[in-house]
Amino acid sequence: MAQQGKAYTIEQKKMILESMQPFLELGFSRSKACKLVGLDETTFSKWVSGDIGLSMKVNSWENMTTALAVANIQMAIRKEAASEDDVRKENSWKWAERKEDSLKPKQDVTSNNETVQVNGFNFVKNDTDNQAD
């Protein structure tokens, strides 16, 4: 017979999740974040798989670093574009073009045509993003 794990109160669960959030936002794996806060990884997995709202929150925390990196890259490219003589301009778009797939978030948590703002930049998800050509 399988042994039952520790039962957490709603308040304990909330505190644990709040403790994990900064680690996930910084790009730590779920496994590492669990170890850092002292939570069994299986327990966390059950929480996330059993709660779509929590799953969306966790995915957004995991995508935070990617979103900030993309926003910073866009800002740098815009700065370079403002300068006529900046040779980095051509290199920036080439780099971004090569990295396009790796810069995409792990999972999209926006709804259809929803605008998401990160560092003053608007990102819009629309129907054409997921349609095959």
Image (tube, rainbow, N blue to C red):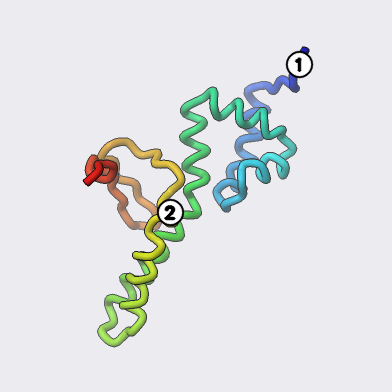
In this view, 17 is above or below 117: above
22, 130: nearer the viewer? 130
On the image, which quarter does residue 128 sit in? top left
Q: Which mark is residue 67?
A: 2
**16 is higher (above) or lower (below) than 50:** below
Residue 6 pos. (x, y %): 75, 22
From this view, report whether residue 58 is shown above or below residue 69: above
Q: List x then y, in percent, for residue 33.
A: 66, 44
Outermost top residue: 1
* Figure quadrant of the N terminus: top right
User: Crowding near pointer 1: few (<14 within 10 Å), some, many (20+)?
Assistant: few
Residue 12 in the figure: left or right of residue 25: right
Task: Give the CA separation, mark 1 to mark 2.
Answer: 41 Å
Q: Looking at this view, name the residue that lies furthest to the front.
A: 133
Q: Residue at x 28, y 42 (%)?
A: 130
* Mark toward the start of the polypeptide (1 vs 2): 1
Q: Amino acid at mark 1?
A: Ala
How many numbered callouts?
Answer: 2
Q: Which residue is disc 1 drawn over?
A: 2
- Horizontal arrangement in the rendering, residue 107 relative to residue 11 (left or right): left
Q: Residue at x 29, y 87 (%)?
A: 85
- How far across and how far down the image is residue 102, in percent? 44, 56
Image quadrant assignment for residue 4:
top right
Residue located at (31% from left, 51% from top): 123
Report helix, strand or loop for mark 2: helix
Amino acid found under the numbered disc labelled 2: Ala
Quarter of the image where one finds residue 7 = top right
Query: Residue visible at 74% across and 21% down?
Result: 5
Q: In the orientation shown, which residue stands out farthest toward the bottom?
A: 85
SS category of the residue bearing label 1: loop
The image position of residue 94, as x and y in percent, is: 34, 71
